[in-house]
């Protein structure tokens, strides 16, 4: 709602007429506020005391002032899902306290299950900090009402904040975090590369899906060290990393490091997605780091197929080597043009659909790097290139076309010959689904082909029956 050409009076009429009309039946609301000063105030006043069913709210480009007003409004008390999306220039990214809005949200929305607050913490005087223990203000000690929280996505914060956050979200199942520690002066009294102790796995007993986005080598090693104890219980790990790498550093990143610290710690059945952009200093000739990825065992597996590509730019020092490593399918929403190399096109000729390789992409941006080389291709048999069977499909006949997975089954991997049936307590209600959806808390999913029915007595997700005092109410 709202755009740059809508007058205030027109926007007010829209709120008064449309929202009042549908308020009593409103379950999900998605708002884009662009140049609408006081827009949320008009919307909330139109919904006040009329909205009783609202459970899902998605806010786009809201300001901190408007968001604060929202958190004081009674209509958000019953929300199960709160999603916030902002631009890179949003004032939310200039707050110098970590966990400020997460604390506010959890205290005002007691039933919250799914929360996305992609705000990056801002550190004043970031280059003048001497000690890791004297970093930013943190609000998490007062974090309340996380009993129902199952999915959480937050922006860039320090690993110190992350360590404290873990102790506050005991029932989290799906966690997405960004980690970027401060650039600090290296003095003899401070060990800049000290790594945290692994978290007690009992604090994250229900965690099954983890996404980590790091902006430098130190943040990567600290985040991995912190989560190392829970890797074995994950069913899905996603790692995004964009950083410069120094070969001589004790915290360098190589194919062997990714293999040892990440892949080898996962359950063999777990899925992992990688999106690594590495800028290696003084390695343009020998390509030591690059070659370490070529020989790493995980880059040569058929499952979670890895694509490695060298890049060259006139802006990059001739002594440096830049390359990218990513798995397919790639779940990034914003794609650089260098990902569409000739080798990728050659390995995936038509009629393969780009949506199978990049299922969530919604933005493409031009990049100055040239594709120098692509060393690992997708599927190759002799001199004949084969089509890839994408997620949500299976290929029982090598000479035939891909077949959509039937409801009640799913397939997340490339090149599969069959789909996997959903387990009890999960469902796939549409053809061609890549993963089965776990039954949410408060519901019972007696069928693997349709959504579950409400069941307030089911406190945890993944339930196939509604149980009350030990008796099944839904067969």
Image (cartoon, helix red, strand yellow):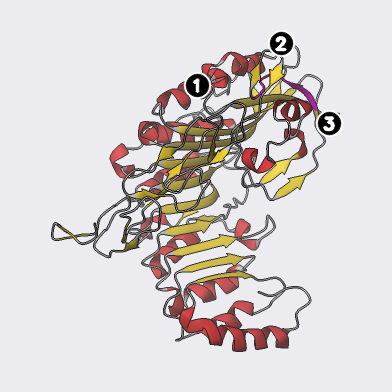
**Residue 17 magenta:** no
- Image location of residue 95, percent across then percent down: 58, 58
Which residue is more in the foreground, 243 or 450?
450
Which residue is more in the foreground, 170 or 406?
406
The segment highlighted magenta reads 371-378
User: Residue 259: which numbered mark, if any?
Assistant: 1
- SS at circle 2: loop
Which residue is more in the foreground, 404 or 194?
404
Density class for disc 2 (Cα within 10 Å; few <14, some 14-19, many ≥20) is few
Q: Quadrant of the N terminus?
A: bottom right
Quarter where residue 302 is shown: top right
User: Residue 315: which numbered mark, if any?
Assistant: 3
The residue labelled by disc 2 is 286
Which residue corresponds to the image point at 40% horizontal and 32% vertical from the top-left? 231
Sequence order check: which comes first, mark 3 or mark 2? 2
- SS at circle 1: helix
- In this view of the protein, can residue 311 be seen by the observer? yes
Which residue is more in the foreground, 379 or 106?
379
Sequence order check: which comes first, mark 2 or mark 1? 1
């Amino acid at each position: 709602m709202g755009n740059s050409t809508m007058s205030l009076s027109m926007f007010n009429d829209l709120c008064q007429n449309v929202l009042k009309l549908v308020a009593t039946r409103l379950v999900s609301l998605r708002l884009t506020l662009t140049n609408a000063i006081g827009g949320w105030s008009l919307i909330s006043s139109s919904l006040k005391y009329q909205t009783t069913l609202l459970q899902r709210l998605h806010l786009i480009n809201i300001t901190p002032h408007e968001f604060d007003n929202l958190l004081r409004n009674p209509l958000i008390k019953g929300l199960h899902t709160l999603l916030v999306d902002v631009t890179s220039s949003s004032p939310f990214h200039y707050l110098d306290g970590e966990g400020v809005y997460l604390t506010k949200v959890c205290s005002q929305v007691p039933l919250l299950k799914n929360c996305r607050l992609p705000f990056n913490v801002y550190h004043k005087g970031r280059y003048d900090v001497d000690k890791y223990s004297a970093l930013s203000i943190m609000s998490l000690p007062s974090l309340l009402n996380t009993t129902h929280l199952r999915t959480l996505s937050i922006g860039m914060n320090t690993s110190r904040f992350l360590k404290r956050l873990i102790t506050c979200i005991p029932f989290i199942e799906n966690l997405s975090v960004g980690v970027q520690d401060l650039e600090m002066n290296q003095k003899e009294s401070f060990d800049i590369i000290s790594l945290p102790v692994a978290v007690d796995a009992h604090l994250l007993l229900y965690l099954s899906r983890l996404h980590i986005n790091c902006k430098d080598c130190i943040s990567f090693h600290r985040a991995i060290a912190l989560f190392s104890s829970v890797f074995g219980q994950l069913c899905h790990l996603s790692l995004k990393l964009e950083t410069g790498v120094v070969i001589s550093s004790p915290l360098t990143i190589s194919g062997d490091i990714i293999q040892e610290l990440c892949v080898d710690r996962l359950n063999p059945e777990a899925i992992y997605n990688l999106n690594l952009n590495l800028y290696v200093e003084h390695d343009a000739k020998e390509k030591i780091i690059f070659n370490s990825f070529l020989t790493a065992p995980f880059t040569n597996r058929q499952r979670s197929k890895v694509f490695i590509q060298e890049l060259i730019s006139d802006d990059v020092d001739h002594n440096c080597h830049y390359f990218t490593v990513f798995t397919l399918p790639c779940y990034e929403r914003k794609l650089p043009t260098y990902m569409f190399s000739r080798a990728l096109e050659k390995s995936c000729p038509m009629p393969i659909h780009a949506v199978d390789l990049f299922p969530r992409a919604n933005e493409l941006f031009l990049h100055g790097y040239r594709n120098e080389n692509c060393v690992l291709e997708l599927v190759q048999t002799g001199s004949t290139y084969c089509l890839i069977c994408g997620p949500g499909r299976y290929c029982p006949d090598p000479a035939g076309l891909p077949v959509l997975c039937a409801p009640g089954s799913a397939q997340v991997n490339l090149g599969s010959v069959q789909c996997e049936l959903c387990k009890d307590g999960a469902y796939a209600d549409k053809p061609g689904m890549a993963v089965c959806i776990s039954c949410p808390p408060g519901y019972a999913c007696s069928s693997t082909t349709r959504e579950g029915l409400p069941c307030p007595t089911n406190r945890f997700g993944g339930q196939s029956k509604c149980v009350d005092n030990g008796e099944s109410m839904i067969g």
